[in-house]
């Protein structure tokens, strides 16, 4: 089984990805990496845990089922987050001009192995 840090570093090498983290429901970072030191990975963890909770409540309220992945686009970037276990969230921060289809594909390919490495 691969090391979680190695798996996250593969995602960080995807063009346009600035940070990737596995975050506990409590907001603490289990493991995370940021490229170029542009983001504080601990801050990413804190806000992601809040964001995922909001996304789950929205899905429950609108009766669309359990959340699998959420993507939020901003003027200068995009955040993709999803549950990888009952207690862990995988989050990725990327540039606005990144290829979102490729990012979602890379996440789909790597998420099962990241979940197994927890």
Image (cartoon, helix red, strand yellow):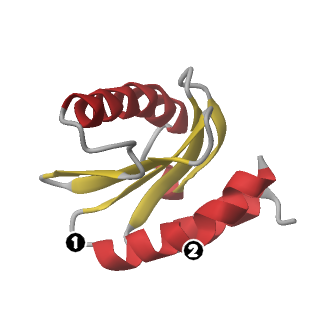
Residue 98 x %, y %: 29, 73
Q: Quadrant of residue 31?
A: top right
| Residue for point 87% across, 65% down | 1
Picture coordinates of residue 78 (x, y %)?
27, 55
Q: Residue at x 50, y 49 (%)?
A: 37
- Please, is residue 24 above or below residue 3 in the view? above
Q: Residue at x 58, y 48 (%)?
A: 84
- Image location of residue 113, percent across then percent down: 71, 64
Residue mark closest to the camera, 2 vs 1: 2
User: What is the crowding at mark 2: few (fewer than 14 residues within 10 Å), some, or many (at least 20)?
Assistant: few
Between 63 and 118, which is closer to the camera in this rendering?
Answer: 63
> Where is mark 2, residue-wise?
109
Secondary structure under tag 1 reads loop
Which residue bears the numbered disc 1?
97
Location of residue 111 with respect to 60 vertically, above or below = below
Residue 94: name its quadrant. Answer: bottom left
Disc assigned to residue 32: none
The answer to which of marks 2 and 1 sits earlier in the sequence is 1
Name the side, left or right, on which 103 lies relative to 77. right
Visible residue check, residue 65: yes
- Give 100 or 40, whichever is nearer the viewer: 100
Determine the residue positioned at 39% across, 42% down.
66
């Amino acid at each position: 089984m691969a090391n979680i840090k190695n798996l996250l570093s593969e995602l960080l090498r995807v063009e346009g990805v600035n940070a990737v983290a596995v975050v506990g429901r409590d907001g603490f970072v289990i493991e995370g990496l940021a490229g170029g030191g542009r983001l504080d990975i601990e801050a990413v963890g804190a806000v992601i845990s809040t964001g995922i909770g909001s996304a789950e409540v929205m899905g429950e309220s609108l009766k669309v089922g359990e959340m699998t992945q959420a993507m939020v686009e901003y003027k200068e970037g995009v955040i993709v987050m999803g549950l990888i276990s009952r207690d862990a969230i995988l989050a990725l921060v990327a540039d606005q001009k990144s290829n979102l289809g490729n990012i979602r594909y890379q996440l789909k390919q790597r998420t099962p192995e990241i979940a197994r490495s927890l």
